[in-house]
Image (cartoon, rainbow, N blue to C red):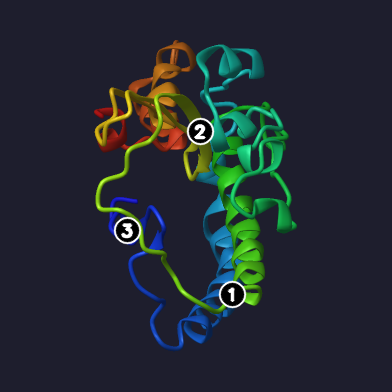
Amino acid sequence: ARLLYNYMWVGGVSHDLPKDFERICIGFLDYFEPKIKEYNDLLTHNKIFLERTADVGVLPPDVAINFGVSGPNLRGSGVNWDVRKDEPYSIYDRFEFEIPLGEGEFGTVGDSFDRYWVRVCEMKESIKIIRQAIKDLPDGDVFQTIPKKIRPPKGSIYRRTESPRGDLGYYIISDGSPIPYRVKMRSPAFTALSSLGEIAQGWMLSDVIAILGSLDIVLGEIDR
């Protein structure tokens, strides 16, 4: 959302898709999908990479849950939880896709390799979702007219989505004015980083770098 925060807004999107978007997007998917095998040949099955990630920085399922870890990091620990499947929103209930889980194929369930491998598998699933979305892309207006100032009724609400790094939630309290009384953002990267001290104990500094990388945090998201 760092690059697209002005495209999606209340009422729809700011403007229509570019001309030939569907053709260009499908062309990229056709190019990218076979590349995943190339990435696996070069990296996933690389002996050095396996030695640096398998059995390194194991995040047990119970520890992941206790820290509130979500997304690929949680699924890398073998926990089958994805907001798109378990609490469907938008039109995700229309799409067919699988939820990859860590299996400890080269080490222990929940190690750095599993967190990496789940993300590789999710690239394949994302391609499936995009192809289905493009196929059913509707015609018509891309936004509706809304007041310049929105005054939600008094009350509170919590909603979450499955972001690339996990469960991204917003808790909003409204006092009836255009400005929220309170907004709390739940960052998946923040909870993932919180688990680092637990899973990095006993490892060399060079291994901690690999463990941190496998958690896939973004500091801009953590410092909200």
Residue wearing tag 2: 159
Give the mark nearest the N terminus, 2 or 1. 1
Q: Which mark is residue 96?
A: none
Residues under numbered marks 2 and 1 in contact, where contact means CB atoms less than 8 Å apart: no
Query: 213 or 129, which is in the foreground?
Result: 129
Mark 3–mark 1 CB contact (< 8 Å): no
Q: Is residue 191 above or below residue 130?
A: above
Task: Measure how far apart labels 2 and 1 are at the Cα level.
Answer: 25 Å
> What residue is pinned by disc 1?
138
**For the point 63% across and 52% down, which residue is it?**
121
Callout 2: 10 Å neighbours few (<14), some, many (20+)?
few
Between disc 2 and disc 3, the foreground one is 2
For badge 3, the amino acid type reads: Leu
- Quarter of the view holding residue 197: top left
Say the numbered circle drawn on residue 4.
3
Quadrant for the C terminus in the image: top left
Dot placed on the residue nearer the N-terminal end, 3 or 1: 3
Helix, strand, or loop for circle 3? loop
- Kindly identify the amino acid type of the residue bearing the numbered disc 1: Pro
Q: Residue 150 at what x, y percent from top left?
A: 31, 44
Q: Earlier in the sequence, mark 2 or mark 3?
A: 3
Image check: 137 left or right of 78?
left
Residue at disc 1, secondary structure:
loop
Coordinates of residue 44 in the picture (x, y in percent): 58, 51
Between 41 and 129, the one lying in front of the other is 129
Residue 45 in view, yes or no: no
At 47% across and 83% down in the image, what residue appears? 24
* Above or below 83: residue 149: below
Image coords of residue 127 (percent x, y): 61, 65
